[in-house]
Image (spheres, rainbow, N blue to C red):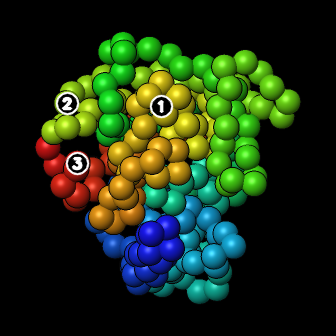
Amino acid sequence: MFISVLNNFISEYIVNSKYTLTESDVLYEDNHLIVINKQSGLLSQGDKTNDKNILDYVKAYIKNKYDKPGLVFLGLPHRLDRPVSGAIVLCKTSKSLTRMNKMISERKIDKIYHAIVLNKPKDNKGTITSFLRKNTHKNKVDCFDQEVNNSKKAILNFQYHKRIGNFHLLEVKLLTGRPHQIRVQLNSINCPILGDMKYHNQKPLSDKSIALHSRFVEFIHPVSKVKISIAAPYPDKPWWSN
C-alpha cells in the first residue's frame, strides 16, 4: 500500500517536470522583483531529487521574455514547501535580495495563508505558540509546548473563515517562519491540513498537494519603498472551489 502511494506520488511530480511558467503565473513584476503563483508540486529550490525548481522555471521565463544573453540572476528570500501553492517572491537583483532578506529577518513582510483543515478549531481565532525541532530521521518537524534542546519558538495567528463541505477554511498569519510551521502547529490543535499525510493519517488529494495556499503577501518594496499588496488566486481544484 505504502509503496503504491509513494510511486503515484513520484509519478505526479514527474508529470509536473513538464511544467512551463507563463504570464498567468506572474502576480507582480518590476526591475527588482517577480512574484509567482507557485503551483503545488514544484520545488522552491533544488534538493536531492534534482528536479527542476521554481528558480529554474522563472530564470527560463525571464531569459525568454527579455531575450537576455548569458546567465539570469535570481534570488529566493523565502520558500514554500513542495506540496504548497501560492505567492512566492523572487528577487531579480542582488540589492533587492539583500534588502528582502533583511526585511524577512526583521519580520517586516506580512504573509497570510489559507488552509483547509479536517476539523473546526475549538476557538474561532487565536494564537499558537510552540517550540519546533527538526526530526531528520523521520524528515518531519516535532512540536513541543515547552522549549527543548535545539528547538525554535514558532508563533502564528489563525482565524476561522467558513465551512467548506466536510472541511473548514482557516486564515493563518505567520509571526515566525519555521519549516513546516503551519502544518505542524495546526495539527497540534487537532486541525490537520487536508491532504497532509506527513502529519496526519489520511488519504492523499488527487494531485498529491496539501490544501495550504500562500494567499496574500504585503511589504514595502525594498527599492521603491512603495507598499506592495499581492493576492494569489486559489488553485483550480475542487476542494478550493466551494
Nearer the N terminus, badge 1 or badge 2?
Answer: 2
Q: Residue at x 64, y 60 (%)?
A: 75
What residue type is disc 1 on?
Answer: Leu
Nearer the N terminus, badge 2 or badge 3?
Answer: 2
Helix, strand or loop for disc 2? strand
What residue type is disc 2 on?
Answer: Arg
The C terminus lies in quadrant: top left
**Residue 212 sits above or below residue 173 on the image:** below
**What is the C-alpha distance between the residues marked 1 and 2?**
16 Å
The N terminus lies in quadrant: bottom left
Circles 1 and 2: CB distance less than 8 Å?
A: no
Label 2, residues with CA under 10 Å away: few <14, some 14-19, many ≥20: some
Specify the quadrant of the image occupied by residue 9: bottom left
Q: Between 184 and 83, which is closer to the camera in this rendering?
A: 184
Q: Between 170 and 137, which is closer to the camera in this rendering?
A: 137
Residue designated by label 3: 240
Report if residue 227 is visible in the image: no
**Residue 104 sits above or below residue 63 on the image:** above
Label 3, residues with CA under 10 Å away: few <14, some 14-19, many ≥20: some
> Nearer the viewer's eye, disc 3 or disc 1?
1
Residue 8 placement (x, y as % from top left): 41, 75
Residue 119 placement (x, y as % from top left): 32, 30
| Horizontal side, residue 83 vs residue 107: left or right | left
Q: Residue at x 22, y 59 (%)?
A: 236
> Nearer the viewer's eye, disc 2 or disc 3?
2
Specify the quadrant of the image occupied by residue 179: top right
Residue designated by label 1: 186
